[in-house]
Image: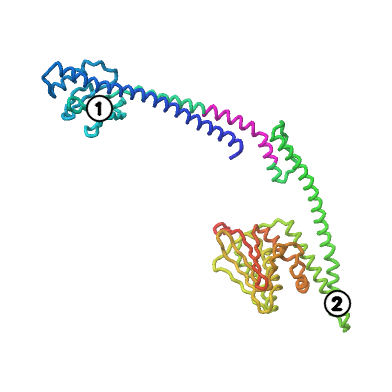
């Protein structure tokens, strides 16, 4: 989520949440207060009825000596019929021993009442819905002339419920309008506040695409303007440094090109003359030894030149990676490597799966990679050791591994092994005509294939070099 969207969304959500919560709390608080007023009124009314009935029964019984249940119920009906009632309030008085027939009821429709066994002397209330109306029912017991009666009052609270619903409708309508107005306002404000940041982001993106000439034009005196000014200063410094590095790199490339080109011609002559001198009929031991040395050093310099040319070639050339079965390259590498490994009295073992192992790459470069790794393994191994070259699939990648049983590499030197001209054992490397460029070339070949190279080594136990290629799916290969 972008910054301007956060500026727009989070304050808006926070405000709307507070707004909605506050509105609902106010509506509910008002509804509870109104409901409590109605309930209190109904409680007072029911209490008044219970006390009035007891008083009326007492006075009536003094006037009329013919006391009895029938007379008590008649007095209750008489009292309730003559008593002024509240509009929208209905009453029902039921004898505890004759629940099937109410003593008095002014209901002109049927509303559910509490079961007599559940009624207690403390008032109990419940909200009921009858068709399109709502009623507050209040029920309690009262005693009169050694008998218990159920006193039920119903108050029509339909207007209260509908007013509450209308308040919610009005509130949510206002809430939706607020969302529209606030969203529009917050969008404009957030876009305006983050305009400078967007300009800065565009400049940083251009810098990521190697365009260091674009600067940010931001007006104002706030923190973003200060950040933009610091960015412009950084961009100018980086631009100067990049220009300087490009010039240095170009000079280095020219030097390597000229050095490699000019070195090859005299090297060819030196090797040729030394070879003629070595193969001549002159029996002088000194002459023969001198020729041998010239020949070896010339071959060494020739190898150095070739490897430097390979480094330049790998750096400048754009390779087209084509999918193929890696086993084919290993089969070709086996034919090339076995003679030299056999002459060194070592065993070369290739371990490949039965199914194809597809990667996208350049075959000649991979042959060079395997050859360099195998040559390093040979130089580090002793007579009778085994060099194993394996490949297999592992999740979404292909692994190529070259393992030897040689002298290994000290732990403190493993991080430098792929540096140019770096040699772990310089004496042994020179004896084997090494120049310290083989593993550097290997690292560059791995980069060309978008792969990863890993080294595992223990002194006097051996070395494993793993190349992790991205797996190329078989079904995507043409043909």
Asked if residue 414 can be seen in this view, the reply is yes
Tell which circle, 1 or 2, labels the residue nearer the N-terminal end.
1
Q: Which residue is mark 2?
A: 291
Quarter of the figure with residue 36: top left
Q: Where is residue 131 drawn, in percent x and y?
A: 29, 27
- In the figure, 36 relative to 234: above or below? above
Quadrant for the C terminus in the image: bottom right
Q: Is residue 403 left or right of residue 274?
A: left
The residue singled out by tag 1 in the image is: 111
- The dominant secondary structure in magenta is helix
Residues in magenta?
Answer: 179-203
Nearer-the-camera pick, 461 or 369: 461
Rendered residue at 35%/22% (across/down):
159
> Looking at the picture, how far across and down is residue 374, in whole percent?
68, 70
Q: Is residue 200 magenta?
A: yes
Is there any visible trace of residue 168 in the rendered image? no
Question: Image quadrant for the N terminus?
Answer: top right
The front one of 294 and 193 is: 193
Task: Determine crowd level at label 1: few under 14, some 14-19, many 20+ residues with C-alpha closer than 10 A.
Answer: few
Examine the rendered structure and indicate whether residue 328 appears above or below residue 244: below
In the displayed structure, does residue 254 sit left or right of residue 116? right
Q: How many marks?
A: 2
* Label at residue 144: none
Residue 162 x, y percent position in the rendering: 37, 24
Q: Circle 2 sits in a helix, a strand or a loop, which is it? A: helix
Residue 302 lies in the magenta-colored region: no
């Amino acid at each position: 989520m972008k910054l301007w969207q956060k500026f727009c969304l989070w304050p808006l959500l926070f405000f709307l949440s507070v707004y909605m919560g506050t509105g609902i709390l106010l509506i509910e608080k008002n509804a509870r207060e109104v409901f409590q007023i109605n309930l209190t009124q109904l409680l007072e009314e029911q209490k008044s009825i219970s006390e009035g009935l007891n008083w009326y029964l007492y006075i009536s019984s003094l006037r009329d000596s013919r006391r009895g249940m029938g007379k008590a119920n008649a007095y209750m009906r008489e009292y309730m019929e003559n008593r002024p009632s509240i509009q929208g309030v209905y009453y029902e008085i039921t004898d505890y021993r004759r629940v099937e027939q109410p003593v008095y009821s002014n209901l002109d429709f049927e509303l559910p009442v509490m079961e007599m066994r559940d009624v207690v002397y403390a008032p109990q209330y419940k909200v009921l819905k009858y068709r399109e109306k709502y009623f507050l029912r209040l029920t309690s017991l009262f005693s009169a002339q050694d008998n218990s009666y159920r006193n039920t009052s119903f108050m029509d609270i339909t207007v209260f419920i509908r007013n509450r619903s209308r308040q919610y409708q009005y509130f949510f309508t206002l809430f939706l309008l607020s969302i529209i107005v606030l969203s529009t306002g917050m969008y404009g404000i957030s876009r305006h506040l983050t305009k400078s940041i967007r300009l800065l982001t565009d400049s940083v993106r251009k810098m990521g695409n190697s365009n260091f000439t674009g600067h940010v034009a931001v007006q104002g005196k706030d923190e973003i303007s200060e950040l933009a000014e610091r960015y412009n200063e950084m961009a100018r410094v980086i631009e100067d440094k990049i220009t300087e590095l490009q010039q240095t790199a170009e000079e280095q490339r020219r030097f390597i090109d000229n050095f490699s080109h000019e070195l090859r011609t005299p090297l060819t002559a030196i090797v040729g003359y030394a070879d003629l001198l070595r193969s001549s009929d002159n029996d002088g031991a000194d002459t023969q030894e001198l020729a041998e040395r010239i020949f070896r050093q010339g071959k060494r310099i020739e190898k150095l030149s070739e490897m430097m040319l390979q480094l330049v070639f790998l750096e400048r050339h754009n390779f087209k990676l084509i999918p193929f079965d890696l086993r084919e390259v290993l089969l070709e590498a086996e034919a090339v490597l076995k003679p030299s490994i056999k002459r060194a009295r070592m065993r070369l073992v290739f371990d490949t799966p039965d199914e194809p192992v597809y990667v996208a790459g350049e075959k000649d470069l991979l042959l060079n990679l395997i050859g360099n790794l195998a040559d390093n393994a040979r130089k580090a191994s002793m007579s009778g050791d085994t060099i194993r070259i394996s490949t297999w699939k592992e999740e979404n990648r292909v692994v190529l591994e070259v393992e030897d049983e040689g002298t290994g590499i000290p732990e403190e030197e493993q991080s430098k092994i792929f540096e140019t001209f770096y040699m772990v054992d310089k004496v042994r490397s020179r004896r084997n005509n090494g120049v310290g460029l083989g593993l550097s070339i290997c690292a560059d070949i791995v980069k060309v294939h978008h792969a990863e190279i890993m080294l595992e080594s223990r002194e006097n136990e051996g070395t494993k070099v793993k190349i992790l290629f991205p797996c190329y799916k078989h079904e995507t290969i043409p043909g």
